[in-house]
Image (cartoon, rainbow, N blue to C red):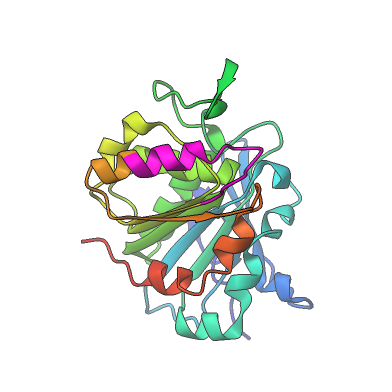
Amino acid sequence: MKKCLYSLLLLSTGIFYGNEGKTQDLNLYERQLFIQGSDTLPCRILSPMDFSINKKYPLLIILHGSGERGNNNEAQLTWGAWLFLDSVNRSKFPAIIVFPQCPKDSSWSQVDRKPVADSLGNFAFPMDGAASRPLQMVMDFIDTLVKSGRADPKRIYVGGLSMGGFGTFEILWRRPKLFAAAFPICGGGNPDAVKLYAKKFPIWVFHGAIDAVVPVANSRLMVRVLRKAGAEVKYSEYPGVNHNSWTNAFAEPELLPWIFSQKRK
């Protein structure tokens, strides 16, 4: 019988508990808990087909939006999980896919609310504080997987939608030497942070042109500043699409080939 990939790990930075229920497709994502002290990060992890302990695999982290927060270790699979379950994709792009879940009372990023909204909405992204506890645990979890020998340190990718798009832009400046590529969807970030990571790896940004939740001006600003800073950046803006631009992004036929072709130098 195939052994659970992560329940074999017991490391100083965290403990993994897993099961291998596979009665439904989504149950191919193993339920895991990453524990640090009194804090727990629920995760669902899809292992490569024909997994071998003698190989290092690309690692992809997907950060969900605010509506999928909680502790049921299920809601974070609402958007995008189907893409990585596709048997053709799993065969062509063997990788470790991780969907962590943020608690309801927290966020992937540090976001302040401005008293008066402008073209960017009322979002502000401070850089003077520590990472939120969930985002810090995601970073520690990545480090743990790399130390375990399972994840290829040169092929680590991150993407996210809405709140997860904010988190994607933030994790990039907090750990600019970690990633090989990133894809924030309908998010935003601090343009002053771009100089910390612009030339480190390629970025593909997505947004809906009529987004009523996170104004598209956020992505337009980040793309403009990234390009000015010399970044290798792609931008897909969808006319007539509101906040659910993740549907379009995950349907992009070149998304997975683009992600998994990137490798950190």
Residue 221 magenta:
yes
Q: Tell me the residue at 52%/69% (across/down).
A: 252
Quadrant hosting residue 88 = bottom right
The magenta span reads: 207-224
Q: Is residue 49 visible?
A: no
Question: Is the residue 65 above or below the residue 77 in the image?
Answer: above
Frontmost residue, 250 versus 180: 250
Furthest residue toward right: 23
Question: Is the residue 104 above or below the residue 87 in the image?
Answer: above
Question: Is the residue 164 above or below the residue 122 in the image?
Answer: below
Q: How far across and how far down the image is residue 182, in percent?
A: 41, 55
Question: Is the residue 173 above or below the residue 75 in the image?
Answer: above
Q: Tell me the residue at 59%/84% (across/down).
A: 87
Q: Is residue 262 visible?
A: yes
Q: How far across and how far down the image is residue 265, in percent?
A: 20, 61
Q: How far across and how far down the image is residue 237, in percent?
A: 50, 53
Quadrant for the N terminus in the image: bottom right
Q: Tell me the residue at 62%/50% (across/down).
A: 64
Q: Tell me the residue at 50%/46% (across/down).
A: 138
Position of 173 with respect to 200 (left or right) is right
Q: How far across and how far down the image is residue 175, in percent?
A: 34, 43
Residue 215 magenta:
yes
